[in-house]
């Protein structure tokens, strides 16, 4: 470690970012790694400089959003709004289509594919979304457009520099706004152009792997839906043999001829199931005081438990009947009309209770009813929209009472078929979970690399073996001469 002076770059509107940046002053000394200098952004490699975003890119914004159906009917021109930007994706993949008349009437400006866009006004700026236009498009006035100067910077490097920035963290509550002038004044680190390209290449390679994994997850989830439709109609038989399965028409649709249709209430009367409401408690906290109180948002749209957000309450007594047990089925009895009826299996250990917006379904005779099969059968009904037809509608929400739930009819296969259906669906769930773990690992890798590469703590030549070399991954793209 050497004692280094603190220096900053002189930034003026006429400064050429390709020229050597002068040292403004040495205001004190600080221990720095060899080859580093102190800048307003912290320690950076000596070859890097700090520039204002407006020095290396044109900064502007979009126009007014067309109002009226006539400007969208048979439209062919892409128009991008704030809601079209995804939080994690690199590209804008959705847009409205507007007419030529809309473009002329609102005097809209077309932005080329490759333009970097992000929200500059409204609550959306706090989400820190960044995206690149896939096609030439018009954009709404709430979006900032960044057009990097190709001769000075790499577009993808600027994009990831902005991904690493938190532009809204100092904004007050209310209606936050990022002015174009302050966006132009945002400081960014600027390595030599070849290193910009190499950094962008590494980050883009990880992001592409993550996008590919997301594609696999989406395909597996569609496969799961198709598999559920097959299994709950024909039973656990190969798709090629479904035509040989004798079916019967029932009130819930076609099912194998040897299955029975029963109401959940019948299974309760026969003491095969217990159905009970949740534990009402309005006083809760999120700091871990008490026991977890599972709520509707703890069941995903895929019918799985999500414990990433937990509310806690004072525990009920030890002999209270509301404690959850492993293999209990939990049913969301109150939610929006679209979400009421989501169902999952409680497959965790520990002390948990349900809110009164959830219903507990406990298997009393596991030799006649398989818990996982039942949870998937009930959630499949949610996929089909069955609960919309039986729920009671209230202001901004819908509910299914215990009695209405008991009145729902389900198919009842023999236990061995229930278990085989459960096994097949669990196999798909395991594949989805493995891919989701891979996606999470890639996301963490991306965040780590983004910070390390943009701060110069990790230098690209150490990763790729040189500024113009290929990535060490055997199937990686070659380092492009230019990303623009």
Image (spheres, rainbow, N blue to C red):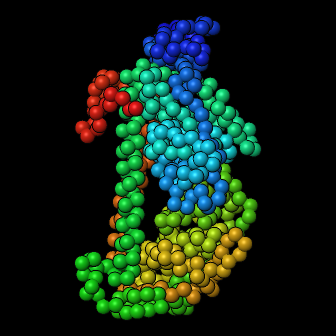
| Residue placed most toward the observer, 266 or 53 | 53
Residue 292 pos. (x, y %): 62, 60
How far across and how far down the image is residue 234, in percent? 34, 83
Image coordinates of residue 358 in percent, x first then y, are 61, 72
Front residue of this view, candidates 323 and 113: 113
Q: Is residue 237 left or right of residue 269?
A: left
Q: Nearer the viewer, residue 70 or 223?
A: 70
- The vertical placement of 95 against 423, above or below, is above
Relative to 257, say whether 378 is above or below: above
Left or right, 174 with reference to 272: right
> Visible in this render: residue 215?
yes
Q: Residue at x 36, y 45 (%)?
A: 209
Mark count: 0
- Quadrant (top left/top right/bottom left/bottom right) for the C terminus: top left
Residue drawn at point x = 40 percent, y = 63 percent: 221
Residue occupying the point 61% across, 38% down: 61
Q: Choose top left, top right, bottom left or bottom right for residue 60.
A: top right
User: Does residue 321 appear in the picture of this structure?
Assistant: no
* Residue 275 percent across, percent down from the top left: 58, 81
> In the visual, does 210 lie left or right of 242?
right
Give me the residue at 46% from left, 15% from top: 18
Quadrant in the rendering for residue 336:
bottom right
Q: Is residue 173 left or right of residue 100?
A: right
């Amino acid at each position: 470690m050497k004692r280094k002076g603190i220096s900053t770059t002189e930034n003026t509107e006429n400064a050429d970012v390709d020229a050597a940046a002068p040292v403004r002053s040495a205001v004190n000394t600080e221990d720095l790694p060899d080859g580093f200098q102190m800048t307003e952004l912290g320690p950076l490699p000596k070859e890097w400089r700090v520039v204002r975003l407006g020095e290396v890119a044109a900064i502007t914004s979009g126009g007014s959003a067309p109002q009226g159906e006539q400007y969208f009917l048979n439209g062919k021109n892409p128009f991008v709004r704030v809601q079209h930007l995804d939080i994690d994706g690199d590209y804008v993949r959705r847009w409205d289509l507007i007419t030529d008349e809309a473009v002329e009437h609102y005097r809209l400006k077309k932005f080329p594919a490759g333009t970097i866009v992000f929200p500059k006004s409204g609550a959306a700026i706090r989400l820190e979304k960044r995206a690149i236009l896939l096609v030439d498009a018009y954009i709404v006035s709430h979006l900032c457009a960044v057009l990097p100067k190709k001769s000075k910077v790499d577009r993808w490097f600027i994009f990831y520099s902005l991904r690493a920035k938190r532009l809204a963290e100092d904004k007050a509550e209310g209606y936050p706004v990022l002015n174009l002038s302050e966006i132009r004044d945002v400081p960014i680190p600027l390595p030599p152009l070849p290193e910009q390209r190499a950094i962008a290449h590494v980050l883009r390679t990880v992001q592409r792997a993550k996008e590919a994994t997301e594609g696999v997850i989406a395909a597996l989830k569609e496969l799961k839906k198709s598999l559920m439709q097959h299994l709950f109609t024909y039973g656990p038989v190969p798709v090629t043999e479904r035509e040989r399965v004798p079916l019967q028409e029932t009130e819930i649709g076609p099912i194998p001829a040897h299955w029975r249709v029963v109401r959940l209430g019948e299974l309760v009367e026969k003491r095969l199931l217990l159905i009970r409401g949740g534990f009402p408690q309005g006083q809760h906290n999120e700091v871990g005081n008490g026991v977890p109180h599972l709520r509707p948002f703890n069941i995903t749209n895929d019918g799985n438990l999500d414990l990433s957000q937990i509310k806690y309450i004072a525990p009920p007594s030890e002999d209270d009947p509301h404690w959850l047990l492993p293999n209990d089925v939990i049913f969301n009895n109150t939610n929006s009309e679209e979400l009421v009826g989501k169902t999952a299996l409680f497959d965790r250990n520990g002390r948990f209770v349900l809110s009164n917006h959830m219903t507990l379904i406990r298997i009393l005779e596991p030799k006649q009813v398989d818990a996982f099969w039942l949870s998937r059968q009930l959630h499949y009904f949610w996929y089909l929209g069955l609960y919309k037809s039986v729920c009671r509608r209230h202001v901004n929400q819908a509910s299914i009472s215990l009695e209405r739930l008991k009145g729902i009819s389900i198919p009842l296969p023999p236990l061995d078929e229930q278990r085989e259906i459960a096994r097949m669906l669990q196999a798909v769930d395991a594949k989805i979970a493995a891919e989701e773990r891979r996606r999470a690992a890639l996301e963490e890798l991306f965040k780590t690399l983004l910070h390390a590469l943009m701060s110069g703590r990790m230098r690209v030549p150490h990763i790729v073996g040189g500024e113009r070399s290929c990535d060490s991954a055997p199937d990686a793209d070659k380092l492009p001469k230019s990303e623009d």
